[in-house]
Image (tube, rainbow, N blue to C red):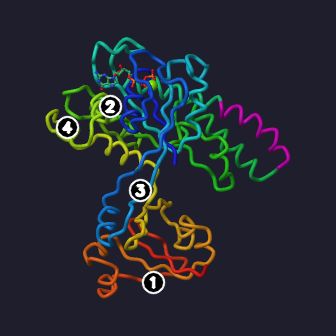
Amino acid sequence: MKVGILGLPNAGKSSLFNALTRAGAQAANYPFTTVEPNVAIVSVPDERLDRVVETVRATPTVYETMEFHDIAGLVRGAHKGEGLGNRFLANIRETDALVHVVRAHSDAQVVHPEGRVDPLADVDTVETELLYADLEQAERRLEKVRREAKSLDRAKMAEEAWLRELVAALGEGRPARSVGVPEAAAGALGNLQPLTAKPVLYLANVGEGDPLEVPPALAQHAEAAGARSAAVSARIEAELSELDAEEATGMRAELGAGESGLATVIREAWQLLGLISFFTAGEGKEGRAWAIPRGTPARRAAGEIHTDIERGFVAAEVVGWEDLVAAGGYTEARERAKLRVEGRGYEVRDGDVITVRFTP
Ligand SMILES: Nc1nc2c(ncn2[C@@H]2O[C@H](COP(=O)(O)OP(=O)(O)OP(=O)(O)O)[C@@H](O)[C@H]2O)c(=O)[nH]1
Ligand SMILES: [Mg+2]
């Protein structure tokens, strides 16, 4: 699962990325600090798994992970190749979701590419570029598919119709996510990977000492788009991430910085992906989270663990994480009739703890 961090130059993307990963990507006070895409793998904290691991005395704990991609800032005209536009856009086309960092602090020391601080106008600049980029891509694809559709291939014809609708929508400033993909052209979205179809988290980068709040105009914009929003101080998080855990907690309290802003960012970004998790854990064995799309049947979920386990699947012993924790262990959960045996077609639920029985 890949998440791209985007925004205007100097919005605070690399500061956030550094904090997320301590990967040491350069954060400097001039545009285009990040020239090569920086990629980092981040663990997704999950308190439910922590409780399960504690209950069954599993070790070690293995969280789900996701990739963050830090990319160069986008400027007006990026779709035409201004700045590092084209490369930037190619780098985020392959991501599953976007974290859009929006500058909300007014530190005069930090240069703003447009010379003023206005979160909503910044979002507009970036989103206009994304729309143009999608429009160009969709028009090019439409040209190609139009030629291919002459063969009267059903899927191609459906894709052509979808692309026409898409081009019209983008031309009117509506994002690709507003245009449904017909079943007959199911693969079309994957071919095009429109930027404006990806789920977005708007992340307001607020000043040190400012309340951790999303500016109202930005919050409204997010809500109207059906997107999530959150606030963080990228600089504080970047500085805190360099301290050890104890020092950081002390500093956080002193600064009134609240819970780890990074945990919020990771959790919110994870939400964008629309996945659920199930857990596996055994005494003295690893306790682990596995991400699957909602609606995945037990046998296919077992395939996440290992293809052999999917192939030899016999049954799944399932207990909800809360029931397991409340009971105090598998044996007790079984005694309380909270542990069920489910077949291959069982639809795995968020937070299920599963032991797969299989024939090797
Ligand atoms: N005062 C203040 N400065 C910040 C904050 N976040 C980032 N900065 C500063 O803004 C400058 C740019 O930050 P970066 O994180 O490098 O910005 P970027 O979005 O990665 O920029 P590009 O890679 O050039 O697109 C650095 O000097 C940061 O220290 C913040 O919350 N408050
Ligand atoms: Mg950067």
* Kind of residue indicated by mark 1: Val
Relative image position of residue 168 (x, y in whole percent): 61, 34
Residue linked to disc 4: 252
- In the figure, is residue 211 to the left or right of 293? left
The mark that comes first in sequence, 2 or 4, is 2
- As drawn, 57 above or below 340: above
Q: What residue appears at the point 42 percent right and 69 percent down from the top-left corner? A: 285
Tell me the mark number nearer the camera, choosing from 3 and 1: 3
Quadrant containing the C terminus in the rendered view: bottom right
Residue linked to disc 1: 341
The mark that comes first in sequence, 4 or 1, is 4
* Kind of residue indicated by mark 3: Tyr
* Magenta run includes residue 138: yes
Q: How many marks?
A: 4
* Kind of residue indicated by mark 4: Arg
Q: Which residues are magenta?
A: 137-152
Residue in the foreground of this view, choosing between 160 and 306: 306
Residue in the foreground of this view, choosing between 72 and 199: 72
The CA distance from mark 2 to mark 4 is: 12 Å
The CA distance from mark 4 to mark 1 is: 46 Å
Relative image position of residue 208 (x, y in whole percent): 23, 26
The mark that comes first in sequence, 2 or 1, is 2
Q: What residue appears at the point 80 percent right and 44 percent down from the top-left corner? A: 149
The mark that comes first in sequence, 3 or 1, is 3
The CA distance from mark 3 to mark 4 is: 25 Å
What crowding class fits label 2: few (fewer than 14 Cα within 10 Å), some (14-19), or many (20 or more)? many
Q: Is mark 2 within 8 Å of ligand 1?
A: yes
Residue linked to disc 3: 63
